[in-house]
């Protein structure tokens, strides 16, 4: 008789427990236990509970490889979901086996969990000469009769859709940096069936032609309507001024959704502000603002130092330039070595703003001239909002880094085509002409930030990374374990984004000059120009010529975080992939990379995205790009949204008058008439408030409470990562004490592991 001690942990989030019956079978290399009901006197599997049980077997089961959990009806109680954290089994010899789950089990069904040591399996690899690995997986596997019982019910173990989020792992029979085997046929077949089940469940779907594809789950369909004659709800919430497509979020798999805590926090923050705007009549007012200071009346209650600074200094040239370095779109500015023909700025025009004893050509040669070019927005038509035609432009802005250490605008052109109706505006022009020209540039910034830097280059690309991972990497794969914390809630928040921002009647259709089609067109153009080499962060600064630009705190902090992540990824990757042949031969890894190229980059070879990885350094670079995109890159463009956008003239989403074609005609009145009306301002602020306020249930970068890696080496690497990030955080906070405007968006304490808002 062999006695196994079993520990089952239930999630701590609200409503994680269940009243359903839970049974268990332990599978080992020498046999399996009987199916045993896990039941104590009183309540089992309550929220946050860690329950211990004893399982008696007629014989020793050998090395444990799988546990099966059965969730079945209990008495008259209705079924309810259960969130299982993990199962631990202590064998008679004292050895403890860890079976991570960290997933919801919805309804009744069976779930198989594998022991937690992450392994790359030579049985699924191609040739691996020079690596010490045998060639395997090229022929059929003969099944030892003693193991035949293991395969008897494999499809039952894997076929359940909820399997798609479990965290199984390889057998644990051989431990080390790379295990050259899932030698047991059941484990090989389990691995293949897992991927087959996930690929049957998760499908790609075209979002907008020319944009990354996204998740489509056909298994989840709206239930039949009880009364088909009753008008269907149109998606409007009283007091909320835009249409929300709730169908885009309602039928997501539980394992992709927000936790109860995060969901409640998200909507509780949204509703009071929307109701307040409604009661004050702001979301129904289509008139212009009468005074600039009236815009402060709609400010949210909690105001930060940056928030107040923007409202006070938004019109200053020095702050205008500062935002290119440390604002919410700090990756646009490029050093200018030659004035482009389409922007005919002369030395006579700008000489007064360059300082004594120099000229434009000299400053170009010194590397002190910078260009912000919004050509990607050229030619996109504007729409009508609130019954009034809107206008659009694709400006160019020339900036000079002066001796005082400030980056200042020195020339602005509001079109990509020069001409008599397109004057070049200068700081010496009238106050309102120059301010309106800068405001047009800030309007263009809105689209380059919200559509390209934020939505496309983080949210949509990260979702493609996530879905490809779910479909192509089994949960026992070390890359899955490395990446899964950085995909948490990404599909949920993107579903909310499509429901609020990118739907008919949503934010883009009701508060943006370009509307839904124009907003999408800007992103399609940007995706067609994305280059893989530029996603490698150190390369991007060199390409733009800003690698030594002073006062660029975004560059300093982003490179520090990048270095910490790259070193962490290097330690993990080299632990599991000791040589290049192990990378090239990992067919699951190659399938993941190929699917990202196909579904995210849409097969565009000019993107430079790899279709396969052949060396360890290539894999390290690729994975670092993925993790950085899903965490720090998003934090840099998201965290400060509200602080820089709440003062609407600094970040307008629409313009109601055409770009100025002659100097000397702008007044305060025409300036206010050009800015968005009150309703458009409130709609934009309301949505940006919602999408930039991080709900509860946060997991800062480097904090991985779900235990996927159990080996000592990767656990040690995680601890080292946290130490490095803590030092970066300390350095940032010390520096910020001396700055008039603190830059803290890349403080690791404020960076989420994943894109969850």
Image (spheres, helix red, strand yellow):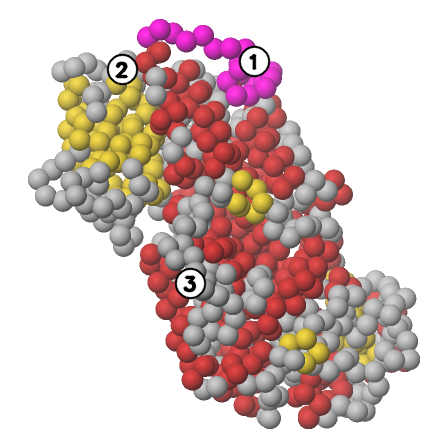
Q: 123 or 683, which is in the foreground?
A: 683
- Please name the residue that numbered disc 3 is placed on: 230
- Please name the residue that numbered disc 1 is placed on: 138
For the N terminus, which image quadrant? top left
Which element type, helix, strand or loop, lies under badge 3? loop
How many numbered badges does the structure rendering display? 3
How dense is the environment of label 2, judged by Cα within 10 Å: few (below 14), some, or many (20 and up)? many
Which element type, helix, strand or loop, lies under badge 2? strand
Q: 587 or 72, which is in the foreground?
A: 72
Work out whether 728 lies above or below 655. above
Left or right of residue 35: residue 504: right
Q: CA distance from mark 3 to mark 2?
A: 57 Å
Work out whether 667 lies above or below 398. below
Q: CA distance from mark 1 to mark 3?
A: 59 Å
Which element type, helix, strand or loop, lies under badge 1? loop
Task: Check the image and name the residue furthest to the left.
Answer: 41
- Report x, y in % for residue 162: 38, 38
Which is closer to the viewer, label 1 or label 3? Answer: 3
How dense is the environment of label 1, judged by Cα within 10 Å: few (below 14), some, or many (20 and up)? few
Is the C-beta separation of discs 1 and 3 under 8 Å?
Answer: no
Q: Is residue 14 magenta?
A: no
Q: Which residues are magenta?
A: 123-146
Work out whether 421 lies above or below 715. below
């Amino acid at each position: 008789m062999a006695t196994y001690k079993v520990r089952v942990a239930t999630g701590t989030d609200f409503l994680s427990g269940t009243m359903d019956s839970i049974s268990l079978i332990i599978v080992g290399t020498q046999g399996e236990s009987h199916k045993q009901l896990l039941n104590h006197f009183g309540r089992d599997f309550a929220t946050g509970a860690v329950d211990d049980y004893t399982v008696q077997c007629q014989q020793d089961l050998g090395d444990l490889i799988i546990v099966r959990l059965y969730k079945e009806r209990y008495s008259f109680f209705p079924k309810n979901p259960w969130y299982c954290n993990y199962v631990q089994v202590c064998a008679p010899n004292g050895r403890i086996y860890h079976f991570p789950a960290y997933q919801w089990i919805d309804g009744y069904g069976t779930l198989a969990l594998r022991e937690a040591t992450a392994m790359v399996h030579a049985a699924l690899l191609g040739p691996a000469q020079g690596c010490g690995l045998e060639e395997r997986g090229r022929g059929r596997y003969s099944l030892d009769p003693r193991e035949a019982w293991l395969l008897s019910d494999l499809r039952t173990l894997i076929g359940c859709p909820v399997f798609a989020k479990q965290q199984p792992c390889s057998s644990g029979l051989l431990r080390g940096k790379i295990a050259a085997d899932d030698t047991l046929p059941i484990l090989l077949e389990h691995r293949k069936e897992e991927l087959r089940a996930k690929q049957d469940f998760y499908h790609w779907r075209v979002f907008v032609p020319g944009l990354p594809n996204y998740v489509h789950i056909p298994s989840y369909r709206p239930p039949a309507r009880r009364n088909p004659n009753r008008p269907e709800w149109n998606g409007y919430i009283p007091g909320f001024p835009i249409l929300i497509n709730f169908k885009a979020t309602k039928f997501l798999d539980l394992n992709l959704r927000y936790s109860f805590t995060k969901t409640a926090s998200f909507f509780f923050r949204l509703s009071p502000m929307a109701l307040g705007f409604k009661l004050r009549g702001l979301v129904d007012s289509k008139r212009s603002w009468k005074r600039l200071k009236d815009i402060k009346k709609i400010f949210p209650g909690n105001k930060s130092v940056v928030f107040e600074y923007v409202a006070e200094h938004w019109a200053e040239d020095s702050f205008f330039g500062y935002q290119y370095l440390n604002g919410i779109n700090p990756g646009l500015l490029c050093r200018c070595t030659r004035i482009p023909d389409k922007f005919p700025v002369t030395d006579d025009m700008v000489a007064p703003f360059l300082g004594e004893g120099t000229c434009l050509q000299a400053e170009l040669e010194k590397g002190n001239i910078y260009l912000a070019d919004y050509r990607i927005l050229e030619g996109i038509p504007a729409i009508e909002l609130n019954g009034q035609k809107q206008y659009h432009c694709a400006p160019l802005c020339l900036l000079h880094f002066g001796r005082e250490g400030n980056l200042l605008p020195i020339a602005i052109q509001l079109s990509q085509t020069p001409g008599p109706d397109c004057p070049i505006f200068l700081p010496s022009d009238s106050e309102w002409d120059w301010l309106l020209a800068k405001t047009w540039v800030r309007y263009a910034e809105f689209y380059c930030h919200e559509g390209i830097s934020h939505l496309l280059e983080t949210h949509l690309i990260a979702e493609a990374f996530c879905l490809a991972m779910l479909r192509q990497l089994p949960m026992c794969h070390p890359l899955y374990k490395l990446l899964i914390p950085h995909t948490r809630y990404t599909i949920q928040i993107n579903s909310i984004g499509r429901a609020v921002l990118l739907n008919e009647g949503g934010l883009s259709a009701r508060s943006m000059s370009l509307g839904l089609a124009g907003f999408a067109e800007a992103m399609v153009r940007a995706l067609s120009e994305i280059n893989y080499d530029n996603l490698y962060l150190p390369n991007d600064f060199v390409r733009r010529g800003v690698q030594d630009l002073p006062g660029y705190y975004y560059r300093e902090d982003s490179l520090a975080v990048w270095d910490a992540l790259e070193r962490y990824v290097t330690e993990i990757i080299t632990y599991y992939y000791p040589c290049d042949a192990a990378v090239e031969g990992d067919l699951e890894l190659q399938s993941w990379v190929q699917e990202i190229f196909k579904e995210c980059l849409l097969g565009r070879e000019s993107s430079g995205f790899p279709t396969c990885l052949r060396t360890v350094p290539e894999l390290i670079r690729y994975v670092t790009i993925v993790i950085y995109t899903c965490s720090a890159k998003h934090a840099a463009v998201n965290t400060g949204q509200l602080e820089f956008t709440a003062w609407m003239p600094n970040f307008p989403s629409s313009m109601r008058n055409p770009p100025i074609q002659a100097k000397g005609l702008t007044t305060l009145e025409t300036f206010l008439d050009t800015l968005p009306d009150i309703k458009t301002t409130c709609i934009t602020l309301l949505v940006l408030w919602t999408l930039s306020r991080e709900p509860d249930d946060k997991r800062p970068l480097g904090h991985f409470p779900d235990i996927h890696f159990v080996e000592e080496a990767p656990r040690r690497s995680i601890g080292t990562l946290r130490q490095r990030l803590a030092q970066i955080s300390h350095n940032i906070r010390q520096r910020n004490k001396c700055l008039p405007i603190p830059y803290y968006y890349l403080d690791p304490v404020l960076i989420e592991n994943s894109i969850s808002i």
